[in-house]
Image (cartoon, rainbow, N blue to C red):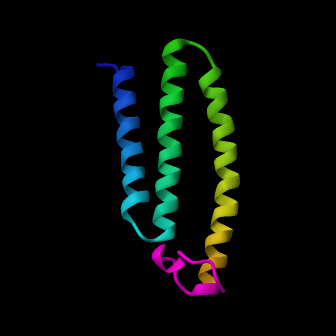
């Protein structure tokens, strides 16, 4: 049995929901950040699946740009998380609600 488009869409939807749950329910900045990355990868999976089943490369080219932006986001985001942790000694979202010094 070969995986069809529906299978990829279901897996992509489940990954996106799992990432959304990580963003909404968790209070640690790193877990929230991993949830965001999981949501981006779920969108990439769906784009590649549509591209494959429509026999054009537009979705795969878009995935290349999304991965490039995600790599830059990781570099900047992790630098911000490390800077906030050094300043506040915590990585919990509720402790960082106020950006006052």
As rendered, which of 57 and 83 lies closer to the eye? 83
State the image quarter where residue 51 is shown. top right
**Looking at the image, residue 84 lies above or below residue 68:** below
Question: At 68% from the left edge and 69% from the top edge, which residue is drawn?
Answer: 79
Provide residue 45's location: percent of width, then percent of height: 49, 34
Task: Please tell me whether the stretch drawn in magenta is mainly helix, strand or loop.
Answer: loop
- Give the quarter of the figure containing the N terminus: top left
- x, y percentage for residue 78? 63, 66
Q: Which residues are magenta?
A: 87-101
Name the residue at 34% across, 19% down: 2
Task: Give the residue at the far top of this rendering.
Answer: 55
The question of residue 88 being in magenta is answered with yes
**Residue sitting at the far left:** 1
On the image, the x and y values in percent for residue 34 come to 49, 58
Along the horizontal axis of the image, is 97 left or right of 69? left
Q: Nearer the viewer, residue 71 or 94?
A: 94
Question: Image height check: is 50 above or below 31?
Answer: above
Determine the residue positioned at 60% across, 25% down: 59
Q: Is residue 33 left or right of residue 76?
A: left
Looking at the rendered structure, the number of numbered marks drawn on it comes to 0
Q: Report if residue 3 is visible in the image.
A: no
Quarter of the picture containing the C terminus is: bottom right
* Residue under the point 66% across and 55% down: 73
- Would residue 84 be visible to someone looking at this image? yes
Whole-percent x, y for residue 29 in the image? 51, 69
Q: Is 10 left, or right, of 19 in this rendering?
A: left
Vertical placement of residue 30 versus 91, above or below? above
């Amino acid at each position: 049995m070969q995986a069809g488009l529906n299978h990829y869409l279901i897996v992509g939807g489940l990954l996106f929901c799992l990432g959304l749950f990580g963003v909404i329910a968790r209070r640690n900045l790193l877990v929230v950040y991993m949830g965001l990355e999981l949501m981006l990868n779920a969108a990439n999976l769906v784009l590649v699946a549509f591209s494959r089943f429509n026999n054009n490369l537009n979705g795969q080219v878009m995935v290349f740009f999304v991965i490039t932006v995600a790599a830059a986001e990781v570099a900047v985001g992790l630098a911000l998380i490390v800077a906030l942790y050094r300043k506040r000694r915590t990585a919990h979202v509720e402790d960082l609600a106020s950006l006052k010094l």
